Amino acid sequence: MSVPVIGAALALEDLRIYRDWIVEKQRDLELQSFVDAKVLMSDWADLAAAHKELLDGYTGRLGIHGPFWGFTLHSIDPEIRDVVRRRVAQGLDVCEALGATSMVLHSPYTTWDYNNIDNYANGRSSVIGNTHDTLAAAVKRAEDMGVTLVLENIEDINPADRRILAESFDSVAVKLSVDTGHAHYAHGSTGAPPVDYYIRHAGEMLGHVHLQDADGYADRHWALGQGTIRWHAVFAAIKATGADPRLILELRDKAGLPASMEYLAREGLGQ
């Protein structure tokens, strides 16, 4: 039985180490060198060129993690939304320079929202409306570029909220990302459903998965097998969606990549 090929999220220094492993099976690759505003505000042409040189011969699915530090997509402050629009546009500039076809953006939904969003008559529509105001131009540009913006769960407790937001764009350029460790944290610490439920809720809109293990208490980004996530349930849920998401190991310590792959191979879940 065929099992999925697993990729990884790497910054430049990590790509130098794992480049041959990535290219060997043309694994999904997510570059994480461009998340910082200081990088995006600088002349990053040399940094992009260094990535492109390492990726000579790579023909797999290339993406980046977009900017996220210090802001949310649904800020009530219109001047903050101006800044966020600029950061997202800079992320798309990077995609254009590298030939990347996916960019991860963080969900706007918070733990506070879960308990309080319906305290306000326009609570739900405000989140969706402000996010649309922030991303409208980026979504149109992503469509033209052939880039998919994937919305990753962060504090999300109800995975249905993020799907409703993604569907509201009615665009092929907006899909969902599930971060397994974030979902497991939310399950263990804030009463959210288990990780496989997040996958199943995403359904055919699942475009991307961050694979990381955790303990249900914090955002650990451990090697797979070191935490308490039920991986067989997760991969069964991925298969059941019928989607073909990018499967990305996102580990804090990249030295855990071989052990994670050994675990997946041993369990018959990935290669």
Image (cartoon, helix red, strand yellow):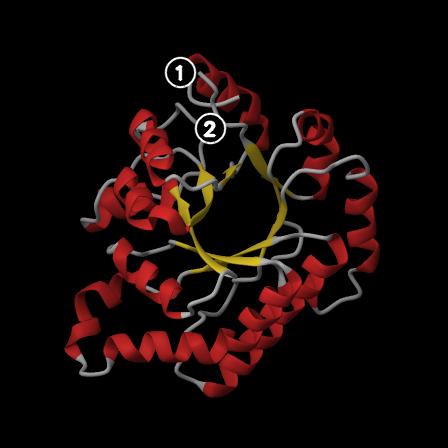
> Does 190 sit above or below residue 55?
below
- Label 2 environment density (alpha carbons within 10 Å; few <14, some 14–19, many ≥20): many
Residue at image position (39%, 82%) is: 76
Q: Is residue 202 left or right of residue 210?
A: left
Residue pointed to by mark 2: 223
Which residue: 28% across, 62% down?
161
Considering only vertical position in the picture, is 115 above or below 86? above
Give 55 or 192, whichever is nearer the viewer: 55
Circle 2: residue type: Ala
What amino acid is labelled 1 in the image? Glu
Look at mark 1 in the image and give the residue it sits on: 267
Q: Upstream in the sequence, badge 1 or badge 2?
A: 2
Residue 10, above or below 268: below
Q: Residue at x 34, y 47 (%)?
A: 203
Q: Nearer the viewer, mark 1 or mark 2?
A: 1
Residue 160 image offset from top left, x and y in percent: 26, 57
Q: Position of residue 269 (x, y in %)?
A: 42, 22
